[in-house]
Image (cartoon, rainbow, N blue to C red):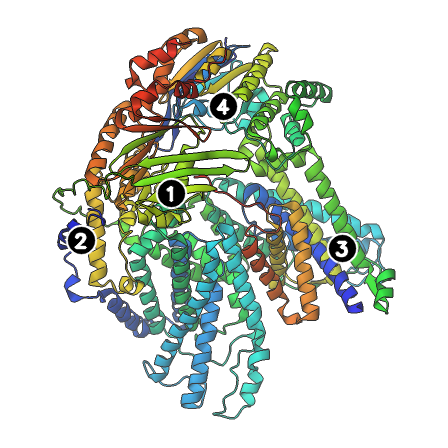
Amino acid sequence: MSLLEVENLSVWYGPVQALRGISLRVDDGEVVALIGSNGAGKSTTLRTISGLLKPKTGSVRFDGRSIAGRAPHSISRMGIVQVPEGRGIFDNLTVEENLDLGGYLVRNTASLKKSRDHVLALFPILAQRLKQPSGTLSGGEQQMLALARAFLAGPRVLLLDEPSLGLAPQIVQNIFRVLGEINREGTTILLVEQNARLALRLARRAYVLETGQIQAHGPARELAASDAIAKAYLGTSLGNSSENAASSD
Amino acid sequence: MLPTSAGNQPAAAGRRPAGAGGTLSSLGVSVGPLVAAIVLAVVLQFGVPRIVGPYWVRIILEAGIAMMLAVSLNIVNGLTGQFSIGHAGFMALGGYTAGMITYYGSLWLWHSPARHGGFLASGEWMFAAACVAGGLVASVAGYVVGLPSLRLRGDYLAIVTLGFGEILRTLLQQTNKVLGSWEEVRTASIGQLVPPPVGGAVGFSGLPKYTSLFWVYAFLGMTAVAAYRLKRSSTGRAMMALREDEIAAQSVGVNVTRQKVRAFVLSALFAGMAGGLFAHEFGLILTPSDAGFQRSFEYVIMTVLGGRGSISGVMLAATLVTALPEFLRDFEQYRLIVFAVLLIVMMIVRPQGLLGVREIWDFWKRQPRLPDLAPQPQSSRRSASRPDSALLEVDRLSLAFGGLQAVQDFSLRLPAGALYGLIGPNGAGKTTVFNLLTGIYAPDGGKIRLDAQSLVGLRPYQIAAKGIARTFQNVRLHAQLSVLDNVQVAAQLHTSQSLVSTFLRTPGCRRTEEQTVQKAFDLLAFFQLQQRAFEPSGSLSYGHQRHLEILRALATGPRVLLLDEPAAGLNLGEKRDLAHSLRELRDRFGVSILLIDHDMGLVMDVCERIVVLDHGVTIAEGPPDAIRNDPHVIAAYLGEETD
Amino acid sequence: MADFAETLVAAIVIGSLYALIALGYTMVYGILKIINFAHSDVVVWGAWISYVLAQRLLPAFGLDPHHPQTPPPLWMGAVILVVAMLACGLLGLTIERLAYRPLRHAPRLNVLITAIGVSLLLQNVGQLKFVFGAIPERMPALLPAWTFTLPILGQAAGRPVTIDLIDLVICGTAAGLLVALEWLVFHTKLGTAMRAVSFDSETASLLGINVDRVISFTFVLGSMLAAAAGFLHAMKYQGLNQPAHETWVLLGLKGFVAAVVGGIGNVRGAVLGGFAIAFVEQFGAHYASPHFRDVYVFGLLIGILLVRPTGLLGTPAVEKV
């Protein structure tokens, strides 16, 4: 049994169908990437899993229990923690207060202190900025803060929505290095990412989304070598050049 | 049929949609409904007292005044979607003004502040003129109160209107110190001009009681007809468009501030007249607390209960709110409790109000007939003004949000008749470029020129008038307006109608209306949307909404069309059709197109040149083939090769 | 100078009351973006509940409930204050559950009409015979009628400047509550959650924060402060108008104006706004004309909004396109 199982999920925004019967699974300890172009339905999938959207049909099971239709806060209590697109930093709070909210549900102060020390070691820059209003952080620092905050919630599955969005390449490298580390320590990750190469290097398996449907899935290495990705990103009428792009790996 | 293609204009003026014409157009101004209202008022004046007793006569009279106030408030709260909670202030101001006029007028003409003459005698005419004057004074206040809408939005504007009402209430309480008291009037000799008896907190007593069913319903009829004609005019359409989406309304040339201020002025005008009626009602005294926000709330309740924008709806609600407590009179203690509970329950179970945006007669009226239109030969592609130079020239445009450089040194030369693409990964700054070009953001530096005219510093509606139109990434239609209205509000950009001609529905006014309807239908035909013309645009499928948004932009008669992800959410077949349509509309309407889309296949297929943005910086520019093989572009999309 | 000192004292006392009321408006607005017009009626209920409690408690000490011959023990006032605050907290909770929660995603105009409905309901239920009744009452004195001479101000003024015990109690109670609130909002996990929900409730829910519960708690907190303001107001002015009387409406309205002047949604702004309008009102009344005190208050409101559209400490709103 997988840790997270999504079956035949359909989601509508008013008259628009955003997801057309998506099924995917995430096993314990894996990094799974969800890739595809803008508007393909990646964020919608994450938002439905975390309870922000209600599916019209289909099921979401976590650890064998059905969670579709539950309130977001109760889903996050079960151990599914989402870092939303655009990071969701509370600009009006300090860095430290943002981190405190990550540990909002954790009752055990000793273990909270331990994991706090741990994330501050992973992102040392945050330790220097604890008292600073988080609205004054740079984009990269905000993303680190969002990750650190989510980590403090003690997630079993981290849902990450575009962690590389709008960030300079070397910062993205740094963030993905830490993500690898967090995963090795046992946190399962479902990653939505537009930067396909980066995502496929971190992930073990990946699903490719196009207009609300899963077009391809499989081990990350195989997908990286195929032309499915280039097709999903660069359009179908690109022909030869898309294969060039993919095979240049 | 675009206003800029001047050669076709006379032909359009000669044609009329068959369904819309054939009414009173040959009689000049349309006065039918106004006459009907007067006749009804006379019937009420002489008929009602024969049927019911004086108690109910008074309730019918009060309901009439309440309807007038609710209908006038609905111009601000319903049509423009602004939020005034100071409406009673306008009423009181109008009432005090009218009262001063009848009081002094009566003393001057007839040496007595008492009622002079019977039905339609000279005293009554002075009273009617006083009510109109009260309306005019109130409308000046409406202008002053509406002005802050330039800076303030939503709740904050509402708070200013509340502050206005409260200040007025306080000032009126002090009137006896300035203007004399009732005591002075009573002891003064007949014929002597003394300050009118405005009596501070006690109120404006001693006025001649002229208000009758006739006058109330004559004024109400006038107000309702004016409000209804306003709603169906270009001004009303612009107001409703800004209610639905302010930014989209600006993008089709609606001067949002001007329309809001206009709404306040008109709303105050009718409220002031109603105040005149209120002040001269038998058995009532207009007091300063009538200007306060509690009374304003009553009218707000009526408009929300009736349905935002529905004139018959708010009239129904005003009647119910006035009469309902009378039916509950047996439960004296509980009637306001019942009313409060009804109000809360109503908001929870029927949030759109009794009638929503519809009118009572919409419920059994057939759908309007479609104008019988032959396909129009469209204007062919315009020749570029100066073939060598670019139509739209953008030079080193920059914008930073806080520390983030959203757009840096963006330059572009878009020739007439071109179809260019603007691509880049999420967050690259593409939409920000559009927002800069359309005046939603002011650039930190750089130049934007359309046909050698600088556009920097112009407001969005001015840029629309200069000839740049756009669509939005997340479709921004005026959801509750019909498909036709969505296009018409844009098509009326280069027309003008005065408010007076709107109220009188002059032939010129109707002709302009028919022309914009015609133009809108011509455009709707492009995507075969004519059959859906009278449906609310929010009920269209997503693909049709995307189409409609493009047509709305085209209706402004643009020279440059900016399309923000028109293919997002479309399936493959729809995308193929869109690609075809883009070329066709470029050729047929003679516009230059700049296209943002994430579907690279589409962009590569249709665009002649492509600009690629990443982190606000242009990383490549050239024809599709060059872009496709550019390593920077591949890296930007698929991620950097780092190892 | 003595006039100045006395006006200053009055402004501080009244500013404390406005600040307490403004906090309820501002906290609810900060978190739900709605103007809770029923808040001023919670103030009224706070005052009337205090009155009813005093009527019940005074006879237990053998005192006349209307005109106690001697002041009751000092702790009785404290008990009444706490009970009134708890009762109004419960009232706030009920209002939020029944009237506002079903409208969480409704247009804001509707929520405003609901607020007016709730306000009407509280006013008229309050006037029922078996609740508070429709006759004005007089709050019995719960404090000894002591006055103190202010040392420094009096010397500067050249004649003694006095302050009543009740004024000290008002300032003291308000200061205590403000400090407690400041601590709660800025130094506890729950307060951090409140601020997080007001900034972005969706992300807050992703972190396991039960947004509905935080909202309920905000209503409870605001209503408790309103009850305190009602109690203190009744103690100072003693004359207790019937619940639907317009003087109450004006008091609530000024609390609301204070919240807007300070920047609605901002807790510290509400306190600042409370004192700002009290100063303008008191000094205007004393040095210009007492008849136009409401004009000064609403004039300040409009002036501030025109210069700073979101109030003194408010953050400007940016619309995303």
Question: Which residue is found at the position 30% from the left and 33% from the top?
Answer: B541
Would you identify the image quadrant in which residue C198 lies? top right
Q: Chain of mark 3?
A: C
Confirm or deny contact between disc 1 and disc 2 (CB under 8 A). Answer: no
Q: From the viewer's perspective, is A129 left or right of A42? A: right
Q: Chain of mark 1?
A: B
Q: Report which residue position mark 1 lands on.
A: B448
Q: Report which residue position mark 3 lands on.
A: C54
Vertical placement of residue B252 versus B136, above or below: above
Amino acid at dot 1 = Ile
Q: Report which residue position mark 4 lands on.
A: A161
Which label sits in the foreground, 4 or 2? 4
Q: Report which residue position mark 2 lands on.
A: B20
Which label sits in the foreground, 1 or 2? 1
Question: Which residue is found at the position 75% from the left and 62% from the top?
Answer: C8
Question: Which structural element holds mark 2?
Answer: loop
Amino acid at dot 2 = Ala
- Label 2 CA crowd tier, 10 Å (few <14, some 14–19, many 20+): some
Amino acid at dot 4 = Asp
Considering depth in this image, is A234 or C39 the residue closer to the camera? A234
What distance separates the C-alpha of mark 2 from that of mark 3? Answer: 73 Å
Vertical placement of residue B343 versus C155, above or below: above
Q: Earlier in the sequence, mark 1 or mark 2?
A: 2
Amino acid at dot 3 = Ala
Q: From the viewer's perspective, is B286 left or right of C145? A: left
Counting from the top left corner in percent of width and height, residue C264 is at 59, 48
Counting from the top left corner in percent of width and height, residue B469 is at 32, 42
Would you identify the image quadrant in which residue B174 lies? bottom right
**Numbered tag placed on residue C6 in the rendering:** none
Which label sits in the foreground, 2 or 3? 2
